Amino acid sequence: MMRAVPAELSHEVRLFHESKDVRFVLGRQVSELEGDGRVRCVRLDDGTVLPCTAVVISVGVSPRTALAEAAGLEIDNGIAVDRFLRTSDPFIYAAGDACAFEQVSGPRMRLECWKNAEDQGTLAGRNMLGSDEAYVPLPWMWSDQFDRTMQIAGQAGGSAEDVRRRCPDGTLLIYHLDKDQMILGISGFGSIREVSRGVRMGQLLMERGIRPGRKALADPEFDLRPLAKAAVA
Ligand SMILES: Cc1cc2nc3c(=O)[nH]c(=O)nc-3n(C[C@H](O)[C@H](O)[C@H](O)COP(=O)(O)OP(=O)(O)OC[C@H]3O[C@@H](n4cnc5c(N)ncnc54)[C@H](O)[C@@H]3O)c2cc1C
């Protein structure tokens, strides 16, 4: 999960899975699936044999662009769109996993998560009707693990400082700050209630440009809601 999830959160998720008797085998490659019409075991590149009755393969996705290519649209690791989600044909828009959108700076990017697909779909619809709004992503993703959930909003990588808030029920929230203590992102793993509340609050603080400071963010007793409310009063 290291590509998408902060290392500390990955570690937390791993410990939780291990407490449920899930075994991790890292740094190994699968060399063979063996069976007799049905899979019976997985052989690893160090010779280890893992008996099994089912295999789940997770190898990532690539955008299906054949239709866009046939229509003569520009492709750039996905259907290339500008900041308004317009393809190289200004009468055709693209949104979601398959589209690679222009950012304010840096190369085009593709996001593969539900929230991005929903936000881009809505914006593309508005822009088709003449709205002319640029897409500014505030990425948000979730993943449920047993009875717990993980959520990440904003930018979790490249922070100058990470501030941890441990809630009384064990939920871990991590605020990712820039050098001026502005919140760039928030990630969390734990109970659905605390993670959802914490991440939503982090999103509000980000959207409103509020800097509560590391002491307030780290203290689970510190109520951040008045700060967020005051910013819109
Ligand atoms: C196993 C799995 C787990 C996931 N878990 C999460 C998660 O926990 N959290 C999260 O945020 N996101 C998750 N995602 C990602 C999320 O599902 C996607 O980001 C989201 O569905 C993207 O929506 P979309 O509309 O862009 O594309 P899709 O949902 O892929 O829809 C595209 C549709 O277009 C159709 N299509 C493609 N080509 C053509 C064609 N030529 N003609 C007609 N129809 C066509 C496809 O059949 C499909 O129905 C997960 C994805 C997978 C695969």
Image (cartoon, rainbow, N blue to C red):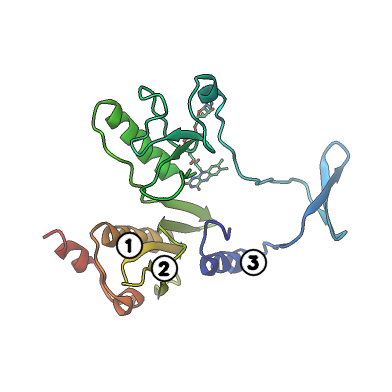
Q: Which residue lies at the image location 43% right of the left edge and 50% below the top edge? A: 106
Label 3 sits on what residue type?
A: Glu
Q: Is residue 197 above or below residue 118?
A: below
SS type, badge 1: helix
Question: Decide: marks 1, 2 in contact (CB < 8 A)?
Answer: yes
- Disc 3: CA contacts within 10 A as few (<14), some (14-19) or many (>=20): few
- Look at the image and tell me in which quarter the C terminus lies: bottom left
| Disc 3 within 8 angstroms of ligand 1 (CB) | no
Label 1 sits on what residue type?
A: Gly
- Judging by the rendered image, the residue that carries numbered circle 3 is 18
Q: Nearer the viewer, residue 66 or 229?
A: 66
- Judging by the rendered image, the residue that carries numbered circle 2 is 173
Q: Nearer the viewer, residue 182 or 122?
A: 182
Q: Nearer the viewer, residue 230 or 129?
A: 129
Question: Decide: marks 1, 3 in contact (CB < 8 A)?
Answer: no
- Disc 2: CA contacts within 10 A as few (<14), some (14-19) or many (>=20): many
The residue furthest top is: 71
Residue 78: image location, x then y, percent: 52, 35
**Number of marks drawn:** 3
Does residue 190 appear in the picture of this structure?
Answer: no
Distance between mark 1 and mark 3 Cα atoms: 29 Å
* Of callouts 1 and 3, the N-terminal one: 3
Label 2 sits on what residue type?
A: Leu
Residue 42: image location, x then y, percent: 81, 51
Q: Nearer the viewer, mark 1 or mark 3?
A: 1
Does residue 76 appear in the picture of this structure?
Answer: yes
- Judging by the rendered image, the residue that carries numbered circle 1 is 202
Q: Is residue 12 left or right of residue 227?
A: right
